[in-house]
Amino acid sequence: MKRALIGLVLLSALAATLLLLRPGPDRSAGQVTAAPRDAGRVARAEADRTQAARALGAPGERRILFGDLHVHTTFSIDALVYSLSMFGGEGAHPPADACDFARFCSDLDFFSLNDHAEGLTPARWRESIDSVRQCNAQAGDPADPDLVAFVGWEWTQTSSDPDLHYGHRNVIVPGLDDDEIPARPITALPDDTMKRARGMSAARVIERLGRSLLGGWGDFLWLTAQMVDVPDCPGGVPSPELPADCRENAATPRELHEKLAQWELPSLVIPHGLAWGVHAPPGAGLDRALAGGNHDPSRERLLEVQSGHGNSEEFRALPQVTRSALGEAICPEPSEDFLPCCRRAGQIIRERCGDLPAPECEKRVRDARRLAAEAGKEFHRTIPDAPLEDWLDCGQCRDCFKPAYLLRPQLTAQYGYAVGNFDEPGSDAEPQRLRWGLIASSDGHAARPGSGYKQEQRRRMTDGRGYARERDDRLLRPWVIGRQRDPQRAQPVPEEPRSLRGLFDVERTASFMYPGGIVAVHADARDRHSIWEALQQRRAYGTSGPRILLWFDLVDGEERIAMGGETRRRENPTFEVRAIGDFAQQRGCPDAAVAPLAPERRERLCRGACYHPSDQREAIDAIEVVRIRPQQRAGEPVAPLIEDPWRRFYCAPDPTGCTVRFQDEQFAETGRDSVYYVRALQEPTPAINGANLRTAFDANGRPLRVTPCYGGWQTPADNACLAPASERAWSSPIFVDYARGPD
């Protein structure tokens, strides 16, 4: 830390000589390229999908369109940090970059901007809206645009208390006029956050210093100062009556929904990344999302089940930390396929005992387990000098597809479909339930919507971050995770308020970062209204990146109920699934696609890795059906209610696609409400981080060592960390309730 102190002294001295300098204006949202997509390319994509659907006998009354509803630019403060050279970043990627990437690099049909609300100062909110309008202005005929861009933001809530943790939400609105957009984004910041930030002397120095002298760091500190200067909105005032230039906070989803309702505008509120252990504390669960009015089924129509930050679909009955009668954390025993991190903390300390007396060693092992269990997602700070490799694969799901880091099982989609709120029933006296459609998106932080079409450019097309230089890693590590006071003893992690420090703790998650997912809709047309209607009706599905074509319908004679639909019946339901794999990708970029971009902009945005389909499709390997029968009473065990997979159908290696028809013969007999959705799995192909930590096991299945895929200096940038994975699509469910009562 001596070097850091010297640097601070030098910075202060420099500031003292430049007291009269003022920072320049805000960085621009950029300029959208004034050109449409290649019209022939758009027409060919539509024709290919129509022809493929017709050949497979799929319903053809609607078209499938692909998009991304979770896009960050460097208007998000975390994205701005990761754009710095310290992290090997490329510099600023403002909102205009997202539009150009979607139009020319990834060839999308729609996307939304979702920068974190806390970084969207009043000026930046207006610029973000203007950039979306510019993007749509280049799209041609509004009835048949080449690209539809939506306005949105991210409400980013976290808590170390599982009872107060709700997780992240993307808010999206359909309109573009001033009277169709809220005057300000709504944050989830605790009330005292900016009061604490006012003491940031470094940010105050920049107000005098002029940020051009510090490059990207200057921009970061300048933006922090601008955020501090935005006053909190007064309480108790309806949202439309508040001043435009204040920061509006909502501590819970209920408050967020209430504020949105006051605008009397349509909006979607899309939960995402709920099962990520990097944000969610152990013990958090979706039961709470149904309590206290925190679920609004009219707005929360969709759930982002997959992104570049991993999969939040799959429930696993993993050993969990529990509490004693006195409130002390109890570390669980490991299972055959799961190593709790608190157990691994004890193992690390045991390996360090050396010549300590056996009783003292065992005491320290028990202390390490307890402290790591108490620390939750900050467990690694109990032994801060232990490198990532020492922790092996603790806390990770070993059999999940592209799992989220430190998967939280009770925050997964499957758990959410299984639970109900019996204490606060809905208007029909039935238990409240979560009936989300399933989508996927990128959650990328470099303005690259729909980045999952190729498994290339790991450092650019994923959010895998790390320090570009070893010296920065060593210098910042003590500040980020602490200093080891005694190498033979674990230490408690101090309770700290939410701060920017967490943005720099990146090395552990890099092996769990992937190219982004994508959302598909079955829409009546390409226009804004048709796409919005499909999202509202849950006629949507998600993929892990490829543009898989998927249809999932309940069929009853001439009647068809598409994915996302609801029905009530007594007869056994019959379903049809049709799936077609994406085109295999060619190297590089199609000349016609990127022709409107200047060469230097083309290289900086697309990185020579555009969506570039060949004429050969990947084969669908299998169709998996998941059946979930929600709780019928409070406290009913959840694990037996989730059947994954309930059915699995293997497909012939046919590039024209796969068709499956099946019936639930048990529905009428059991009389239970049921949720059905399907996964279409492509044949395995190499995928970035397909093996995550690349764990080696002994003959008994115990982890021996890991080879992490670092985002920084430890792993070469040209190493894509590829391993085979079955890329997939998830349909939105069909919700089939059993019709009780008299005929």
Image (cartoon, rainbow, N blue to C red):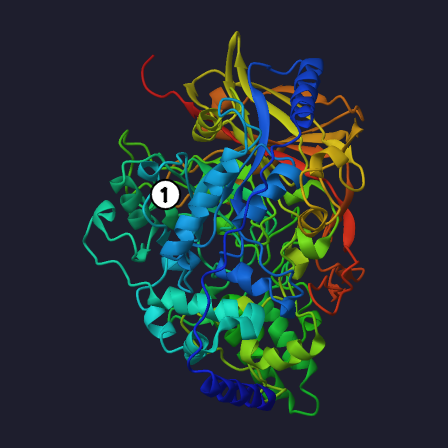
Residue labelled with disc 1: 634
Identify the residue at the far front of this view.
Answer: 20
- Tell me residue 606's x, y (percent): 69, 46
Q: Amino acid at mark 1?
A: Ala
**Residue at the image point whose x is 65% and y is 59% from the top:** 464
Quadrant containing the N terminus is bottom right
Q: Secondary structure at mark 1?
A: loop
Instruction: Identify whether 575 is placed above or below 388.
Output: above
Specify whether residue 641 is in view.
no
Compare residues 736 and 612 and report the one nearer the observer. Answer: 612
Specify few, some or many for label 1: CA neighbours under 10 Å numbering under 14, 14-19, or 20 or more.
few
**Residue at the image point whose x is 50% and y is 55% from the top:** 28
Specify whether residue 91 is in view.
yes
**Residue at the image point whose x is 60% and y is 82% from the top:** 362
- Tell me residue 451's x, y (percent): 65, 44
Instruction: Identify whether 55 is placed above or below 93.
Output: above
Compare residues 613 and 583 and report the one nearer the observer. Answer: 613
Instruction: Identify whether 389 is placed above or below 319.
Output: below
Compare residues 37 and 444 and report the one nearer the observer. Answer: 37
Q: Is residue 257 left or right of residue 478?
A: left
- Tell me residue 350's x, y (percent): 66, 80
Identify the residue at the far top of this view.
Answer: 558
Instruction: Identify whether 63 is placed above or below 188.
Output: above
Count of numbered marks: 1
